[in-house]
Image: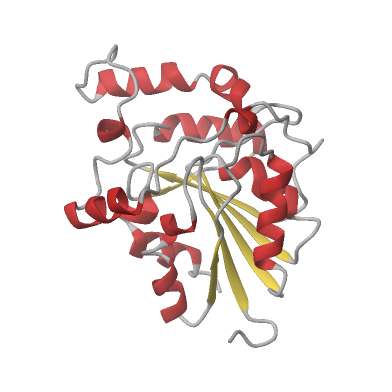
Amino acid sequence: MAHMGQRSFVLVPGAGSTASYWQLVEPLIDKAGYQSIAVSLPNWPGATLADQADAIVDAAQAATEITLVAQSMGAFSAPLTCDRLPVAELVLVNAMIPAPGETAGEWWANTGQAEAMRSNDMREGRDPDAGFDAQTHFLHDLSPDVLARLTSSGDDSEPVDSLFETGFALSRWPDVPTTVLAGRGDRFFPYDFQRRLAKQRLGLEAEPIPGGHLLALSQPEALVARLIRDL
């Protein structure tokens, strides 16, 4: 049981993922003496960002001091909870940083993600016209045992369309200390792209961390070491 005032890490996955995305991170947080709360986000037909925010609040309602960690598209729902939970810190990981009113569907063209991925593929010697491939852009740095566990868990469902059609409801970013962590080896949201996005949208410097897009599965030790570093 968490004692009063203990830091809790509320872990929000990306699109189509569940709490099991954090399966390698949670034991390391717990071992370090903190509480971990991994959230599964609603992904039913018609689900909205507000539904996802409600799920985060429900999961974390007993926590008293929260580091809220949002992976990828989790950055669209996690900030919506900062006025409803005792959030001490917001940490974005390989994040889709939203602009006010923007939908997750609009985000891709607005940010230039496709061109950034294409340029990165070209620079690293991959076919720039092949487009997105899960093995190439998501799973490339996962160990065989982690990959086997991931595929057997079924934690790879497609996010429902309605999530991409809801505008980000905040007019400004929450007044919470925010950290942007960007995977050095992310082929989906390349590091330089993430740096530009963090600077343009939040005025923040993205901080490099080892690993690709799914670094909670490929580099859990490095991620947890960074999350607990200043506590």
Q: Quadrant of the N terminus?
A: bottom right
| 4, above or below 116, in the image | below
Which residue is painted at 58% across and 50% down in the image?
41
- From the viewer's side, name the closer residue of 68 and 139: 139
Which residue is painted at 48% across and 52% down in the image?
18
Q: How many numbered marks appear? A: 0
Which residue is painted at 49% across and 83% down in the image?
33
| 71, above or below 201, in the image | below
Q: Quadrant of the C terminus?
A: bottom right
- From the viewer's side, name the closer residue of 120 and 167: 167
**Residue 52 at what x, y percent from top left?**
66, 48
**Residue 186 at what x, y percent from top left?**
36, 38
Q: Quadrant of residue 58?
A: bottom right
Q: Quadrant of residue 8?
A: bottom right
**Residue 20 at what x, y percent from top left?**
43, 58
Q: How is the image coloured?
A: secondary structure
